[in-house]
Image: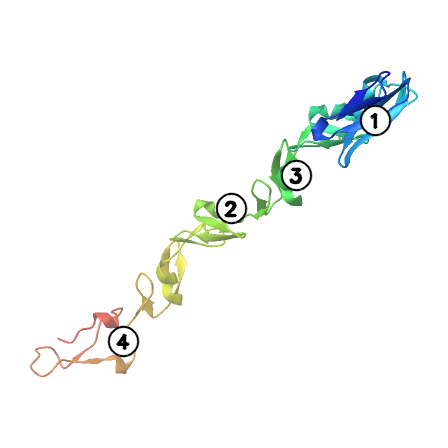
Amino acid sequence: MRDTFSGSTNSVSTNQFKISIRCSVLPLYSASVRTTSLGAECSIKPEGDECPNECSDQGRCEDGKCVCFPGFSGPDCSLSDCPGNCNDKGKCVNGQCVCDPGFTGPDCSSESCPGNCNNKGRCVNGQCVCDPGFTGPDCSSESCPGNCNNKGRCVNGQCVCDSGFTGPDCSSESCPGNCNNKGRCVNGQCVCDSGFTGPDCSSELYDESTPNNYVRSAPSHSRTQPFFQPKRGVTKAEIEIK
């Protein structure tokens, strides 16, 4: 910010930002005081050599005329040469728009997207439209097949299925105990391999085709026959000595 003083006096001073400076001038000259990051400085020039509006701080004054910085024009350098004057959503620097947060484009007319969609999607009206395989407000997360069919949660691009469901997309019903690797799961029910039975295929079928599979009867006081051969399909767990 600049404080300008002119007249026939031989000195001027300013207390801007608690900085005090005194510029000595000759008659018919004026002095301007500019505060800088290092302090303050004096600019002395002949009276009548002032530029309009101090060139709006967007140019320098030479012989009473403004020489505008790139990106500005007009008698006082107040006109922006940036497209659309940056639509009041940014500032013009050297003829190019430096957009405010949330806006982008040559003229700052477009809403920007978070993280520029991480180069994994495109920005449409301020929202990311993610490429296949990615999701999230900024397309930073890997997506899961079928969004896990609302039967699980997506973790690092893989479905972690809810209880009772399985498969890459959690679309299949799971079977108890995964059929204990002794059968296959069909629509949530175990179809057991030969020789096994039960809801989870954990029970072994009694094989009556082998003579060794006969079970000796109970002690002599039992009223049962000396030997007992189970019916086909009876499991070992169901055979009891009477």
Q: Secondary structure at mark 2?
A: helix
Distance from the alpha carbon under mark 4 to that under mark 3: 69 Å
Between disc 1 and disc 3, whose residue precedes?
1
Q: CA distance from mark 1 to mark 3?
A: 58 Å
Q: Using the image as rendered, state which of residue 3 and residue 90 is in the foreground.
A: 3
> Distance from label 1 to label 4 (Cα)?
119 Å
Q: Say if 234 sits above or below 146 in the image.
A: below
Tag count in the figure? 4
Q: Residues within 10 Å of mark 1 (few under 14, many from 20)?
A: some
Residue 123 position, x and y percent, is: 65, 36
Q: Which residue has dot 4 on it?
A: 208
Q: Earlier in the sequence, mark 2 or mark 1?
A: 1
Q: Residue at x 46, y 49 (%)?
A: 153
What residue sits right under mark 1 in the picture? 23
Residue under pointer 3: 122
Give residue 154's position: percent from left, percent from top. 49, 49
Mark 4 or 3: in front is: 3
- In the image, 61 versus 88, the foreground residue is 61
Q: Quadrant of residue 111?
A: top right
Q: CA distance from mark 2 to mark 4?
A: 48 Å
Q: Is residue 158 left or right of residue 61?
A: left
Give the answer, above or below, for where 92 lies relative to 132. Answer: above
